[in-house]
Image (cartoon, grey):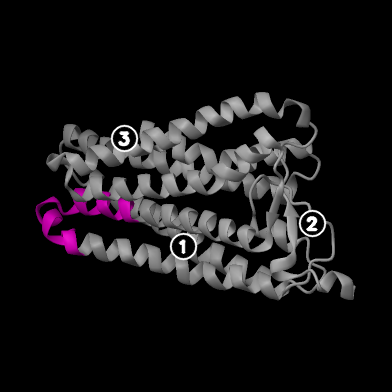
Amino acid sequence: MSAFKNTTSSFVVFFLTGVPGLEAFHTWISIPFCFLCATALSGNSLVLFAIITQPSLHEPMYYFLSMLSTTDLGLSISTLVTMLGIFWFNAREISFNACLSQMFFIQLFTVMESSVLLAMAFDRFVAISNPLRYASILTDFKIAEIRVAIVTRGTLTLTPMVVLLKRLSYCHSHVLHHSYCFHPDVMKLSCTDTRINSAVGLTALITTAGVDSTFIILSYLLIIKTVFSIASSEERKKAFSTCISHLGAVAVFYIPLISLSFVHRFGKWAPPYVHTLIANAYLLIPPVMNPII
């Protein structure tokens, strides 16, 4: 056991996994993954370029859209190197510190995306319930404050979760089950007590995605109440139509997240490649679909 403890923290090397059982087809599998990555990077870059260069798009709704595209770009870049490294070069090794860094940024951009979706729900609520005060409520300064709050919240929430992994000893197999570093995956390789890590990870999940999803639902309940109080059916349709794209983005983000959680908890019967493909889809689908939506 002591020999393993000598290899903890920065001396540990983890081995990432491609698609278990389909290693012979990694080159072919990389083709759709490359296409999805290229679509995500180009699509979100175009959205950012359009918003930055077009003065007519310098409005609160498009500022929030630019934040969403920024988080999607960060999420894509955070996973791109290790994912394609495995598929193209079978480069599976990743150092402990590099693993923690990747894990932190993947989690950070995920939390930021959840926060941006909540901010966009608030934007739609203000626009529909109080359109005359919309510009005075969501000023440039207020949006800048929201942007800083989103980054600060994610950083403060996730830093303890990642740092606490450094106190663990890793004496089991160093093989991870994904093509990127995933917090529960790393914890399972520890031979020391991980109850504190599990509690901190669960707390981070509840206080970010859990809280955000609750307030998004609450925002839409208030939006529905406001819309049904409008006398004109034409105005009601117009109000609902402004929410369709945001609802699509919420679905694209939360459905893969929920699917991944269910597969990890209840899908032990499923082949290993199912876990891997859903885990990759969880990170690739939102950045690909959001620019289209």
Name the spot of residue 32 as percent of width and height, x first.
Answer: 57, 26
Is residue 226 in sight in this rendering? no
From the image, which quarter does the C terminus lie in? top left
Q: Of callouts 3 and 2, which one flags the residue occurring earlier in the amino acid sequence?
A: 3
Numbered range of the magenta stretch: 119-141
The residue wearing badge 2 is 174
> What kind of secondary structure does the magenta stretch mostly adopt?
helix
Q: Is residue 282 left or right of residue 150?
A: right
> Dot 3, how many residues are within 10 Å of its Cα: few (below 14), some (14-19), or many (20+)?
some
Please report the residue visible at 58 percent of the width from the left and 38 percent of the height from the top.
281
Three-letter amino acid code at the position of disc 1: Val
Three-letter amino acid code at the position of disc 2: His
Name the spot of residue 57 as percent of width and height, x first.
Answer: 17, 42
The residue wearing badge 3 is 46
Q: Are marks 1 and 3 in contact (CB under 8 Å)?
A: no
Please report the residue visible at 27 percent of the width from the left and 35 percent of the height from the top.
241
The residue wearing badge 1 is 211
Please report the residue visible at 30 percent of the width from the left and 46 percent of the height from the top.
66
